[in-house]
Amino acid sequence: MIYLDNAATTMRKPQEVVDAVVAAMGSLGNAGRGASAGALDAGRMVLRCREAMAHLLGCPRADHVCFSANSTSALNAAISGLVGPGDRVVTTVLEHNSVLRPLARLADERGAEVAYAGCDAHGFLDMDDLERLATPGTRLVAVTHGSNVTGNLVDVARVAELAHAVGALVVVDASQTAGAVPLDMASMGLDVVCFTGHKGLMGPQGTGGMAVAEGVEPRPWAEGGSGVHSFERRHPLGWPTRLEAGTLNAHGLAGLAAGIAFIEKNGGPAAVGAREHELAQRLYEGVAGVPCVTVYGGWPVAPERCGGIVALNVDGLDSAEVADALSAGWGIACRAGAHCAPLMHRALGTERQGIVRLSCGWFNTEDEVDAAVDAVRAIAAS
């Protein structure tokens, strides 16, 4: 199989990740739940992963990295924990439902006011529109760092500058970029960065979380066991406990720590992202201009602002038909449909057809990309 669905999950993991998870399954107890060797080893593993994640994201305090099952749960916790009744929130049409649906719930249940900044014809965020919508008194700006449909990147440092000018906080969805695009919370002025472990970080599914700047204090989203202050009526507010109710996935976090170490060993997010960008550009150049093929996103006008995704359609075919043909005829795995990003598809005019998303990862090769180009050309020619 030629695996070009890395934007959904990196299926090919470094061997170090596999080994770390297997070792953890046979040795780790429950972090923070006792003083046995297994429990203490689990606690140390979680701490190592927390410190590695803080370093990767430029979060000054490792105890402000809080783990969850994925970026969806982290985004729910961040948004619900920071937005109060009647608050104004600005987001964008680039967003995944992991941002859109929590905001819709807050609009329905808490009377939150939600505004959506648009994009240009290539799917790049309209920064002027965002600035117009981020009026004084806005509580929160929630924005993706990279579109999961087109791969277009967002200048989140500029977003933070605009948001802070009106007194708003910034929540960044780094699901598509953590591990593959450099992020530095401190220098970029980011208040919350949510991440998932199973994509660019090359870790297991079931891992993720958020990094929170000092002074930003989301209310606990979930409450329950914490291992500390058990006689308190409500969930403790100390860091990182306030956002980590229940048993942590120490086995998965062992794999996530190994994934981060692998990235750092290979030059860090900049090097990983450069490799993915190189492959995606090769793929784009191979399909661009092919009759009956439409490519979406910023590749034709600003390739330096694109990630490892090439989004396309073949005229007259539903995106699912193309993805099925790629799989059945050439053994190529990709993703078709709406990608949980309805507003992006409305902006691009692809609500009915969907989009075929081919996403490159660290372990892909030039030969695999060339095979995908040949396959798309063959489908278009037929």
Image: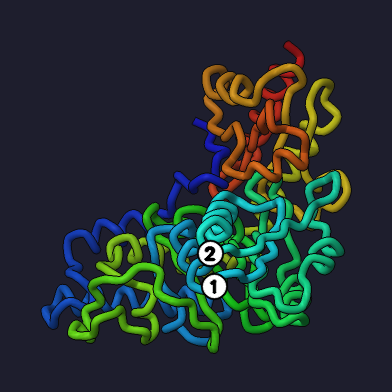
Q: Which mark is residue 84?
A: 1
**Residue 322, quarter of the rendered image:** top right
Q: Residue at x 69, y 32 (%)?
A: 351
Residue extending farthest top: 382
- Is residue 24 found left or right of 70 in the rendered image? left
Spot occupied by residue 336 in the image (x, y as percentages of width and height): 59, 32
The reply to whether residue 200 is visible in this rendering is no
- Between 380 and 94, the one lying in front of the other is 94
Disc 2 element:
helix
Dots 2, 1 in contact, CB < 8 A:
yes
Disc 1 element:
loop
Spot occupied by residue 181 in the image (x, y as percentages of width and height): 64, 63
Q: Residue at x 82, y 68 (%)?
A: 131
- Is residue 8 found left or right of 141 in the rendered image? left
Tell me if mark 2 has few (under 14), some (14-19) or many (20+) residues whose alpha carbon lies within 10 angstroms of its own: some
Type of residue at label 2? Answer: Arg
For residue 109, above or below residue 217: above
Q: Residue at x 48, y 59 (%)?
A: 71
**Residue 268, quarter of the rendered image:** bottom right
Type of residue at label 1? Answer: Gly
Q: Which mark is residue 153?
A: none
Of the two numbered discs 2 and 1 on the same chain, state the one appearing first in sequence. Answer: 1
For residue 234, above or below residue 171: below
Residue that label 2 marks: 110
- Is residue 119 found left or right of 375 in the rendered image? right
Tell me if mark 1 has few (under 14), some (14-19) or many (20+) residues whose alpha carbon lies within 10 angstroms of its own: some
Residue extending farthest left: 36
The reply to whether residue 274 is visible in this rendering is yes
**What whole-number distance in Å separates the C-alpha atoms at marks 2 and 1?**
7 Å
**Residue 162, quarter of the rendered image:** bottom right
Q: In the rendered image, which quarter contains the C terminus? A: top right
- Between 81 and 84, the one lying in front of the other is 84
